[in-house]
Image (cartoon, rainbow, N blue to C red):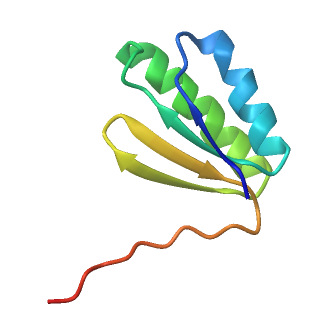
Amino acid sequence: MNVLVFEPTNFNDTRIAADALKASKAVLINYEKIEQSEQVRICDFMNGACYVLDGSVKRISAKMVLYVPNGVSIEEIIPTK
């Protein structure tokens, strides 16, 4: 399984990430270098692509989102005390 880290600079870059997801690769998108309005558009587009491909989405932080293809589960490890 490959995980691609993607840092878009504008909405037009989003196709690269969607094509990778379509090719069964996990995509971690880092939104730190993009304006909030573009972040919302890209999130909406990627969430739609993920839905159509039966993938999953997990927000990692306020500026990072993980998109995985169908068949890949996202599980959190919660430390025990």
Q: Nearer the viewer, residue 35 or 26?
A: 26
**Horizontal side, residue 5 vs residue 1: left or right:** left
Residue 61 % position (x, y): 33, 45
Q: Nearer the viewer, residue 65 or 1?
A: 1
Residue lying at the far front of the rendered structure? 2
Residue lying at the far bottom of the rendered structure? 81
Residue 9 % position (x, y): 52, 11
Q: Nearer the viewer, residue 41 or 66?
A: 66
**Horizontal side, residue 62 vs residue 33: left or right:** left
**What residue is shown at x 67% (from left), y 11% (from top)?**
12
**What residue is shown at x 68% (from left), y 40% (from top)?**
48
The quadrant where residue 41 appears: top right
- Vertical comparison of 69 with 17: above or below: below
Q: Quadrant of the N terminus?
A: bottom right
**What residue is shown at x 30% (from left), y 78% (from top)?**
78
The quadrant where residue 37 appears: top left
**Horizontal side, residue 32 vs residue 56: left or right:** left
The quadrant where residue 20 appears: top right
Residue 16 % position (x, y): 74, 25
Residue 46 % position (x, y): 63, 36
- Vertical comparison of 57 with 73: above or below: above
Residue lying at the far left of the rendered structure? 81
**What residue is shown at x 42% (from left), y 14% (from top)?**
34
